[in-house]
Image (cartoon, helix red, strand yellow):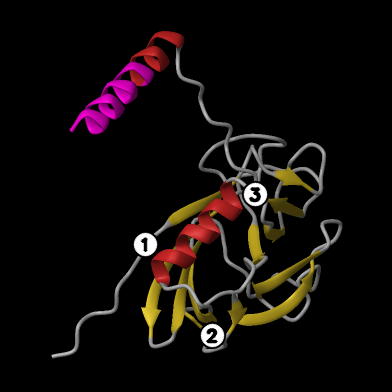
């Protein structure tokens, strides 16, 4: 019997009020992208569940409807795109070094057509819907290692990821969002003191054992 592939289901990127936008104010278009990493032979399969969350919360110009026409991101050092792209519906076009003006380019991107920056939105992802995209990355890391690298890069090091919207029913009518991690909530002083004391006690016990 073949053992199931090891999965290192990982993290979610939320694009919303905290994102950097190509518009001021933000239109209110929003999305989330779930990343999952699985070992597959010598490569790692990345599965993305991309959801158009526009209207779930109101911010910016208050959009309630938008069509998501693309998602892309930069790769961590040592990872390369190894093909085997599949998808379940919308965003069925793979693009390398996709133009994402005014934010530069994205190493890998998935869109409704060959024009990540523009084009029509007829085959985009409508409000409230999700699509699944999978592909392989080549890397010296296994799934767990690659997940850790990407997580740290997105949430701590500013690795770029972005989404593109058209047919937005508020603001400028289209939008591009760059992922920004939410600001961490600082611990109250008392709680921080307690955690420091607990950590110090645990360290002392380890040293004495």
Disc number at residue 9? 1
Q: Which mark is residue 157?
A: 3
Q: Which residue is mark 2?
A: 85
Left or right of 197 in this view: 28? right
User: Residue 205, relative to residue 147: is it above or below?
Assistant: above
Mark 1 nearby-residue class (10 Å; few <14, some 14–19, many ≥20) = some
Please tell me which residue lies in front, 126 or 38.
38
How crowded is the residue under tag 3: few (<14 C-alpha within 10 Å), some, or many (20+)? few
- Mark on residue 87? none
| Quadrant in which the N terminus appears | bottom left
Residue sitting farthest toward the right: 102
Residue bounds of the magenta highlight: 196-209
Magenta span: chief secondary structure: helix
Task: Specify the quadrant that holds the C terminus.
Answer: top left
Could you say whether the residue bearing mark 3 is in a helix, strand or loop? loop
Q: Residue at x 74, y 54 (%)?
A: 176
Residue 22 in the image: above or below residue 45? above
Marks 1, 3: nearer the viewer: 3
Mark 2 closeness class: few <14, some 14–19, many ≥20 residues within 10 Å: some
Asked if one can make out residue 99 in the rendered structure from this viewpoint, the answer is yes
Q: Quadrant of residue 156?
A: top right
Residue 124 in magenta stretch: no
User: In whole angstroms, how far apart are the C-alphas of marks 2 and 3?
Assistant: 27 Å
Q: Residue at x 21, y 28 (%)?
A: 208
Label whose residue precedes the other's in the sequence (2 or 3)? 2
């Amino acid at each position: 019997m073949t053992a199931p592939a090891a999965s290192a289901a990982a993290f979610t990127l939320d694009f919303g009020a905290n994102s950097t936008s190509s518009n001021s104010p933000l239109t209110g278009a929003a999305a989330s992208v779930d990343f999952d990493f699985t070992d597959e032979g010598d490569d790692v399969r990345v599965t993305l569940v991309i959801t158009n969350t526009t209207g779930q919360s109101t911010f910016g110009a208050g959009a309630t409807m938008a069509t998501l026409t693309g998602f892309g991101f930069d790769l961590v050092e040592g990872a390369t795109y190894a093909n085997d792209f599949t998808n379940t519906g919308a965003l069925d076009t793979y693009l390398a070094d996709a133009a994402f003006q005014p934010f530069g380019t994205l190493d890998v991107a998935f869109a409704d057509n060959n024009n990540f920056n523009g084009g029509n939105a007829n085959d985009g992802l409508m409000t409230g819907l999700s699509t699944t995209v999978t592909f392989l990355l080549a890397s010296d890391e296994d799934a767990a290692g690659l997940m850790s690298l990407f997580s740290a890069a997105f949430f701590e090091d500013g690795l770029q990821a972005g989404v593109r919207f058209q047919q937005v029913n508020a603001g400028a009518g289209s939008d591009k969002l760059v992922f920004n991690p939410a600001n961490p909530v600082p611990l109250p002083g008392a709680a921080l003191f307690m955690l420091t004391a607990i950590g110090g006690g645990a360290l002392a016990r380890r040293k004495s054992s």
